Amino acid sequence: MNLSDCFRHFGAKGRNARWSWSARSEDGRVIVITLWKDRVSVVDGNVIYNDVDVDTSAWVHRPGNRERLENLCWARDNCDGFFRAVVVVAENIKAQPRRIVQCYPQPNWNMRILDLNEGTGGFRAVHIR
C-alpha cells in the first residue's frame, strides 16, 4: 500500500502522488494527515502526535509540507480540528529528509489538532475517542 492508497481509504486525494503528505476529500469534509510513527506516543492512555519542536529546516519549504499546512489549517477552521491519520514509518528516523518504508491508514483514529505552528507546519494532535 502506498500513500495514495492510504488517502483513498478515507475518500481523499493529495495534490500530487509523488510529494503529497496529506489529502482532502472533494467536499472538504475529510482531511488526512501523515504521522511519523516515531513521533506518536501514548500518554495517560491517549494517542498523541507531536512534531512541534522538530527541526524543520530540511523540509519546511517543500511542497508536501506546504500542502499539509494548508490541510491542517483547513481541518482547524472547517472540521473542528479533526483529521484522519495515516501512519508512516521512516527508513532512518535521523535522516533529513526522511524516506517512507511503510505506511498504513489508522481507520479508528480520529485525531484533533491541539497546537499548530503556521510558520513551520509543526503540530500536536490527540486521538479523540
Image (cartoon, grey):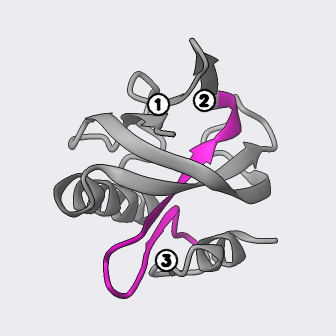
Residue 14 marker: 3
Could you tell me the amino acid type at mark 1?
Answer: Asp
For mark 3, give the secondary structure: loop
Mark 2 Cα-neighbour bin, 10 Å: few <14, some 14–19, many ≥20:
some
Mark 2 and 1 residues: CB-CB less than 8 Å, in contact?
Answer: yes
Looking at the image, the residue that sits furthest to the top is 44
How far apart are labels 3 and 1 at the CA level? Answer: 21 Å
Judge from the rendering whether residue 125 lies leftward or rightward of residue 17; answer left or right.
left
For mark 1, give the secondary structure: loop
The image shows residue 101 at horizontal and vertical percentages of 82, 53
In this rendered view, identify the residue nearer to me: 95 or 91: 91
Judge from the rendering whether residue 31 lies leftward or rightward of residue 13; answer left or right.
left
Mark 1 Cα-neighbour bin, 10 Å: few <14, some 14–19, many ≥20:
some
Q: Is residue 7 above or below residue 52?
A: below
Magenta span of residues: 19-38
The image shows residue 124 at horizontal and vertical percentages of 40, 32
In this rendered view, identify the residue nearer to me: 92 or 22: 22
Classify residue 62 by image quadrant: bottom left
Mark 3 Cα-neighbour bin, 10 Å: few <14, some 14–19, many ≥20:
many
The image shows residue 91 at horizontal and vertical percentages of 81, 43
Could you tell me the amino acid type at mark 2?
Answer: Arg
Residue 39 marker: 2
Q: Is residue 33 above or below residue 109?
A: below
Classify residue 105 by image quadrant: bottom right
Q: Which residue is mark 1?
A: 51
How far apart are labels 2 and 1 at the CA level? Answer: 7 Å
Could you tell me the amino acid type at mark 3?
Answer: Gly
Looking at the image, the residue that sits furthest to the bottom is 26
Q: Is residue 70 above or below residue 11?
A: above
Instruction: Residue at 70%, 50% (x, y): give it.
Output: 88
